[in-house]
């Protein structure tokens, strides 16, 4: 028997070694395919395997049909929307997931981002405390419960909405159950998303829901990006147009820009929609960050080119793109 661990985004070395110990101690051959990039490499690698362990890699009909000996696919994580279940079933392949495996890590990520935003990305201003703030958890599964546990440590008031989870389970965790999703979003200053990407949930987090959130509220999405209705970006922009005089909308020409560009051109025919080349924007954003936040202490001895900002530089990247536009449109 042969098992393939295929991860375009690799596991941590300790995880790979753990899998290797278990598999090889059972007398089973283990193969590893990491950072493969091209789908053709994946198709070639699955030809002779009976077991497949994946992360978020797309296991579609083409991959499943290429794996003639395949008996089982294990998704390292809870979500399995990256696997074609219909084709797997037709081919007699068992698909399994591992809910809870990464739940604490994801919950810690939620609070890593929440603290950073509450403290204004540590830009020198005071920000705000989390203690006493209201946190809404959208879906009270393994990750949601870990988020609740950490939130209580911060002294937050925790609410949760999950039509599939009994209220008694939430109450046992010291969480206040909410039965109306609109109430969750209108009540809480922070909402943490943990819903799967299904036909029911895709694009369900929309403008109508988000506009109910209190002023200055934060949405933290560590679930799937597909649950956010990005097309309703248009409605958000329209609401800004009602408040401000906006003649030009400037955006970077990154990976997902074409779809959004076409959408904006269609909806705002009386506005200029300008695409700016994003080449080296991240590098420029990092430089801008360090100009405003110069290293202190021993870090001053390390060349800036070898340092990475401790916070995301998306805001700085937006400034860089805006400056590029202004430079060529004086």
Image: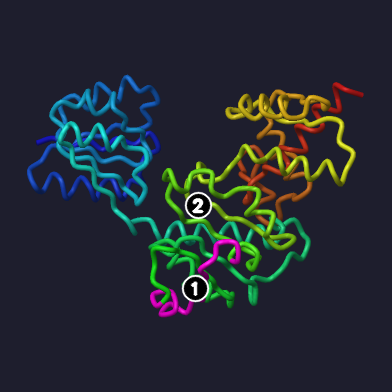
- Residue 116 location (% of width, % of height): 64, 58
Q: Which residue is mark 2?
A: 222
Q: Is residue 44 left or right of residue 8?
A: left
In the figure, residue 191 lies in which quadrant?
bottom right
- Residue 37 location (% of width, % of height): 40, 26
Query: Can I make out residue 298 in this image?
Result: yes
Q: Residues within 10 Å of mark 1 (few under 14, many from 20)?
A: many
- Count of picture labels: 2
Front residue of 257 and 14: 257
Q: Is residue 292 left or right of residue 10?
A: right
Q: Which residue is mark 1?
A: 177
In the figure, residue 262 lies in which quadrant?
top right
Front residue of 170 and 154: 170
Mark 1 secondary-structure assignment: strand
> Does the magenta run of residues contain 170?
yes
> Does the magenta run of residues contain 20?
no
Residue drawn at x 78%, y 38% is: 319
Magenta stretch, residue numbers? 168-183
Color scheme of the displayed model: rainbow
- Residue 119 location (% of width, % of height): 69, 62
Residue drawn at x 71%, y 42% is: 235
Residue 65 versus residue 167 in the image, above or below? above
Q: Is residue 32 left or right of residue 308?
A: left
Residue drawn at x 75%, y 32% is: 321
Q: Residues within 10 Å of mark 2 (few under 14, many from 20)?
A: some
Query: Can I make out residue 279 in this image?
Result: no
């Amino acid at each position: 028997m042969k098992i393939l661990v295929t991860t375009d985004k690799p596991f941590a070395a300790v995880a790979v070694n753990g899998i290797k110990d278990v598999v090889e101690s059972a007398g089973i051959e283990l193969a590893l395919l990491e950072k493969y990039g091209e789908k053709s490499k994946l198709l070639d690698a699955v030809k002779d395997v009976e077991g497949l362990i994946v992360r978020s890699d797309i296991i579609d009909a083409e991959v499943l049909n290429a794996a003639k000996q395949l008996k089982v696919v294990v998704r390292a994580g809870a979500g399995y929307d990256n696997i074609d279940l219909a084709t797997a079933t037709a081919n007699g392949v068992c698909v399994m997931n591992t809910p809870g495996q990464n739940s604490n890590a994801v919950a810690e990520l939620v609070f890593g981002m929440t603290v950073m935003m509450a403290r204004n990305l540590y830009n020198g201003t005071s920000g705000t405390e989390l203690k006493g703030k209201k946190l809404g958890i959208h879906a009270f599964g393994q990750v949601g419960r870990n988020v609740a546990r950490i939130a209580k440590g911060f002294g937050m008031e925790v609410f949760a909405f999950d039509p599939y989870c009994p209220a008694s389970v939430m109450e046992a965790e010291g969480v206040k159950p909410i039965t109306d999703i609109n109430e969750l979003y209108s009540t809480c200053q922070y909402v943490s998303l943990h819903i799967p990407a299904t036909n029911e949930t895709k694009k369900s987090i929309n403008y109508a829901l988000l506009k109910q959130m209190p002023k200055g509220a934060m949405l933290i999405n560590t679930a799937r990006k597909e649950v956010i209705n990005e097309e309703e970006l248009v409605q958000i922009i329209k609401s800004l147009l009602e408040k401000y005089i906006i003649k030009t909308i400037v955006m970077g020409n990154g990976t997902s820009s074409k779809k959004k560009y076409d959408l904006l051109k269609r909806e705002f025919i009386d506005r200029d929609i300008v695409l700016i080349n994003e080449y080296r924007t991240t590098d420029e954003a990092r430089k801008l960050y360090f100009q405003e936040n110069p290293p202190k202490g021993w870090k001053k001895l390390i060349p800036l080119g070898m340092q990475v900002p401790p916070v995301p530089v998306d805001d700085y990247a937006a400034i860089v793109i805006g400056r590029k536009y202004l430079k060529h449109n004086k």
